[in-house]
Amino acid sequence: MNFPSTGEVSDFYPGFGEFETETYRVDTMLGTTKFGLICGSLPGALGMTLGIASVEGIIGNEILMERTLGYFPRRRLLVLS
């Protein structure tokens, strides 16, 4: 799939540090809610390190803008509204 480019950004991940990545606007749906996210690729070393823990991606705090988040760890439930 081809997603519209939104340019290169500098990002940061704790324990890894700062990195540059090309970003794209990706239309996303979570449950019945549609929204657009700015997404980028993780650098090789960071992607491999997180892959060992079966992490497939990182959702940034952009998803929280104009939304309410509830996390209920005992129920293993994350609610976004």
Image (cartoon, grey):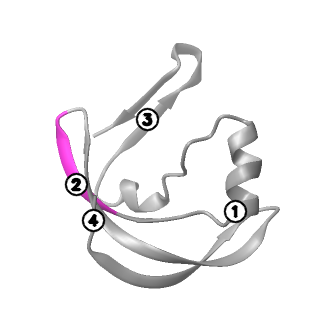
Provide the major secondary structure of the magenta segment.
strand
Between label 2 and label 1, give the one nearer the viewer: 1
SS class, disc 2: strand
Which residue appears at 67% of the width and 55% of the height? 47
Q: Look at the image and tell me in which quarter the C terminus lies.
A: top left
- For the residues bearing labels 3 and 1, Cβ distance under 8 angstroms: no
- Under circle 3, the secondary element is strand
Q: Quadrant of residue 51?
A: top right
33 in the magenta segment: yes
Instruction: Give the residue drawn at x 72%, y 59%.
Output: 46
Highlighted magenta segment, given as a residue range: 32-37
The structure residue drawn at horizontal position 27% and vertical position 65%, both measured from the top left corner, is: 2
The amino acid type of the residue labelled 2 equals: Phe
As measured in the structure, the alpha-carbon distance from the residue carrying label 3 to the one carrying label 2 is: 18 Å
Mark-to-mark CA distance, 2 and 1? 28 Å
- Going by the numbered disc 1, the residue's amino acid type is Gly
User: Residue 17's x, y, as percent?
Assistant: 77, 72
Does label 4 or label 1 sit earlier along the sequence?
Answer: 4
Reading the image, the residue beneath label 4 is 2
Q: Quadrant of residue 31?
A: top left
Q: What residue would you read off at disc 3?
A: 70
